[in-house]
Image (cartoon, rainbow, N blue to C red):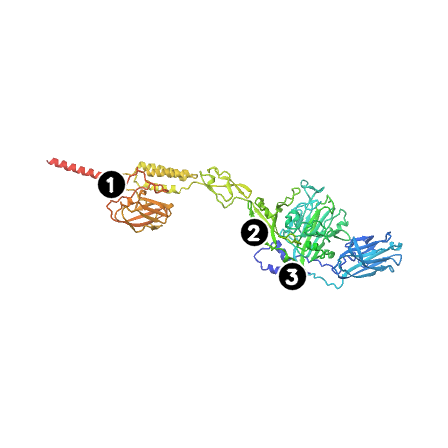
Amino acid sequence: MKGKVTKLILTSLLIAGTVVTATPSLSDVHALTGPEYDLIELQRNRLIQNGDFEKGTANWTSLVSAEVSSDSHVKGNYSGKIKPNTDSHANGHIWQAVTLEKNTDYILKGKIKIISTAQDSTAALVIKSGTLDNPSNVDQDTIVSTTAEWQEAIIEFNSGDMTNFIVGMDRWAENANEALKNSSAYLDDVTLTKVGAEEPDETYDITWWDDFNGTSLDTIKWDYELGHIRGLEQQHYVRSDENVYVKDGKLTIKATDRPVESQYNVGGRQVIYNSGSIRTHDNKQYLYGRFETKAKLPKGKGVFPAFWTLGSDFTLDGVINDAQGHGWPSCGEVDIMELIGDGSDGSARNRTVYQTLHYSSVEGGSADNGKYAGNGTAYTIPSGNFNDDYHIFGLNWTKGKMEWYVDDQIVRTVDYSDDQAAVDALDKPQYIQFNLAMGGAWPGEVGTNLAGTTYDVDYVYYGQTDQQKADAAEYYANAPKLNGTQNITMQQGDIPDLLANVSASEGYHVDYSIDDDSFFDNDAGNSSVHLVINSDANKDKLAILDPGEYTLYYTAIPDDLTVSPRKYTRETVKLTVQERTFPTDFTLTGVYGETLSTIGLPENWTWEQPNTILNQYQNQFKVNYSQNGFTTSTTVSVKLVSADKTNLSELMKKAETYIQSETYTDDSISLLKNEVQKAQAIMNKTDATKEDVATAIQNLNTAIAQLEKKPNVEPPVTPPESNDDKYIINDGKEVTVQPGEAVSFRSNASIEKFKEVLLDGKVLDSQYYTVKEGSTIITLHPEFTKTLSEGQHTLIIVSTDGQATAKFGVEASTSNPVDPSKPNINDTSNNQNKPSTNQPQTGDSVQVTALFGLFIISGALGYFMSKKHKKI
């Protein structure tokens, strides 16, 4: 055994040697070092247990007018004794139940000593078939009191088609004489061996274990059973470090007083204690092998510790939908160890443990009536209590057969291969469980002074032989399989498809149950774990789950439920529901003066008061979420900004050009300056609204439109923002047009960036062209091209961030060319507006010059006429 465990350790270390980047946790270190102990070596040389009576009445469960005595013995200190009595048959016996293989030869041996006043008193070594309450005699070897010395009795027999037998010693006579009635018969050194038996394979690989060497319960291996679960028990199972904890290399399950305000009544009994129950259901299942624990059991009135297994398809007392597995006892239960305590120190109950099977005789049955169900066996130590020291309790499980053992003694064997109901219920994956119940229907009412009672566990191991591994592999090869299960995270309000990518073997379908284990309240009266969603058919309830972690049980279910046995496969994952909160990466920006409804929200979120007008006094607003019947609300912050001032800024720059030009009258410039100052105030206003900006733009445009030129002053030329063309003319370059012919030029600049048009270095008034999108298309009006002089001209389309230049030619014309320079008074957002009629028109300066010339000519004529007149 040591060599096998050493092999496991070295293999683990070799594998671990390839993992060099991660820092191992306590669990990792534990996994690398392997279990602390070997599985105990079982005493298999005898099928009779405690055949030397050194453990008192242990295994000798039926004694009539008999006891374990130290009067006489072959070796050791004790023997079994049938005492003198007054029965007319001198009846007495010492029996032990054994389970044997069918059609197998055995040899039963025992040493008998008879103390009698007569030499014809008898006692017999016997082998009987059946059970303790209904035995049938098979054979016996009778010993006669011809001597007061120990005599050996031997029986050779074949088990035939039976497996249950009784062995021991009988004393009985049809008409017993006084000598027989007053005699004492002793039995010692009893052995039962299989003829030609080979030693079974006792080489086990320990594949799973917990030595409890950490600082807390390893929840990767264990989960909790919670609430009040069974019958009249008087404890409430809780998830608490006070009731289940790991310290000094051992697991302790401890009973404590339940707060008075949290106590409640069940079946007339008050639940007065908190206690613990842990299991591997959610994490690990087992099929065939050795289960072994080393534990110190509690003592006291009604204490009820257990080490046991249940079928992994168990529906957990309603926490899983009944249609997704087996209920009790069809799931199968194996009680490896149970004790029902007593208030008297050293009493039989405090030194006796029980070994029991539970299952139904029919598929899905609710009655615990299988052939080998109930009526388990008991093992009793000679003296003291199981609380005095640690003992080993275990089960060796092979296909169709189980062996229970205490310390190194096999105390019960059941070969259930002849009972198909037992095979169906038991030969399938199981999970293990430790719990400390307090009181119940079987142990009776619990004592009221047992707070602090502990059930201490040094270790628990699971190992397999090669044959057990092979048998398990054969089962799994034919069992349904689940594929694609994984932990899932969702948000409140969602209804995810929990069956997406999850599948089962052919002939099976998948469904699930969800419980709220993590929400369990230790102190809330008769609190329990609830089945919150029992099927994918009710997945709509996913949307309204509270935030937190849930246990999600996937089960592969037979399509044909009439098939027997019905095999289920279950896998457990976690479902995490995240609180529905407003997305932290979603920026909310609003414009002063606008309503909340103008601010977009993520899907399924709405403003509680969408018509609220944004102002400088409030930036916190309530939003509501609604989806799939789930609703929530929260408060969000809105970043408030003033309206877009880009167009206003550009228009102010243009206005400054006019102000600096010295082209216009002081009065009209003064009006424009006033509007520029007002516009600057809007630019400086942090909570400017769209209306504020629009009004400023309108007022600036009006002031520009009302500009009046000074006489004989050339209008200013707005220089391009760059000497280099950023954009290009795609259409209209190098064209030649006839006077009176419209001509178009297309720049690849966006129309949103259009500013103005320069012709031969002067700003062209917008009345002479049109602007349209695509990207920016300028079309010179036919009336305007009539006025252009013959020859080459340069047209520049100016945008806010660059320009595009085109050369074009004009053929000869009889019309006089027109000076195209005009102040560009248009709103930058609409370049097709016509200038005000108050603005000076092209040609006015020509008329003034002509009048001035006529005035000079008239003066000159007058001067010459006066000279002539004087000469005369």
Residue 500: assigned label: 2
In the rendered image of this protein, does residue 823 appear above or below residue 91? Answer: above
Residue 406 visible in the displayed image: no
Q: Residue at x 58, y 60 (%)?
A: 18
Mark with earlier residue (3, 1): 3
Question: Quick one: SS at disc 3?
Answer: helix
Question: Quick one: SS at disc 2?
Answer: loop
The quarter of the rendered structure image containing the N terminus is: bottom right
Residue 7: assigned label: 3
Question: Does the CB distance between marks 2 and 1 fall below 8 Å?
Answer: no
Distance from Cα at disc 2 to Cα at disc 1? 86 Å
Is 80 in front, or is 346? 80
Q: Position of residue 228 (x, y in %)?
A: 68, 45
The quarter of the rendered structure image containing the C terminus is: top left
Foreground mark, 3 or 1, reads: 1
Which amino acid, mark 1? Val
Mark with earlier residue (2, 3): 3
Which amino acid, mark 2? Ala
Side (left or right) of 334 relative to 741? right
Q: Where is residue 432 in the image (x, y as percent from the top left)?
A: 67, 52
Side (left or right) of 351 relative to 13? right
Label 1: how many Cα within 10 Å (few below 14, some 14–19, many 20+): few
In the rendered image of this protein, does residue 321 appear above or below residue 664? Answer: below
Label 3: how many Cα within 10 Å (few below 14, some 14–19, many 20+): few
Is 406 in front, or is 568? 568
Foreground mark, 2 or 3, reads: 2
Residue 393 visible in the displayed image: yes
Side (left or right) of 73 relative to 591? right
Q: Position of residue 65 (x, y in %)?
A: 83, 52
Q: Where is residue 443 in the image (x, y as percent from the top left)?
A: 74, 47
Judging by the rendered image, the residue that carries numbered circle 1 is 846
